[in-house]
Amino acid sequence: MTTVWFELARLAVVVNVALLAVLAFVWVRNYRSHGAQHTLGLLVFAGVLLAQNLLALYLYTLHPDFHAWMYNSGSIAHQGTMALNGLETLALAFLVWITWK
């Protein structure tokens, strides 16, 4: 049975994708105007993390075998997944806040 924890983990991944899209937008704009290697590094970081979160979203939502496995796993797996995705959301939210500041 899908728990609230699993649904919150899936929601956190969606939020992560949105936050990474904002960061990538800002960093692309900054890289085009400044061309700094540090900004390029941040952009690559955002791209890799965005790919990871899009894969997670696909697995959590559309992949039948993975979704069935998660659906049938225990609550501790759902809580752990939520903890990992939630911590990433907090880190990305802080990074967005610092970037916009």
Image: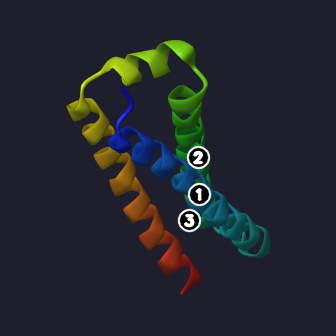
SS for dot 3: helix
Q: How many marks?
A: 3
Asked where in the image residue 86 lies, by quadrant, the reply is bottom left
- Determine crowd level at label 1: few under 14, some 14-19, many 20+ residues with C-alpha closer than 10 A: many
In the rendered structure, which disc, 2 or 3, sits on the residue that comes first in sequence?
A: 3
Dots 1 and 2: beta carbons under 8 Å? yes
Mark 1–mark 3 Cα distance, whole angstroms, equals 17 Å
Position of residue 49 in the picture relative to residue 81 (left or right)? right
- Most extreme residue toward the front, as rendered? 1
Residue 50 numbered tag: 2
Please state which of residues 69 and 87 is positioned toward the viewer in this rendering.
69
Dots 2 and 3: beta carbons under 8 Å? no
Asked where in the image residue 76 lies, by quadrant, the reply is top left
Whole-percent x and y of residue 6?
38, 38
**Residue at the image position 46 percent from the left and 63 percent from the top:** 92
Residue type, mark 1 in image: Leu
Q: Which residue is mark 3?
A: 38
- In the image, is residue 95 above or below residue 72? below
SS for dot 2: helix
- In the image, is residue 13 above or below residue 38? above
Q: Which residue is mark 1?
A: 20
In the rendered structure, which disc, 1 or 2, sits on the residue that comes first in sequence?
A: 1
**Residue at the image position 39 percent from the left and 16 percent from the top:** 69
Residue type, mark 3 in image: His
SS for dot 1: helix
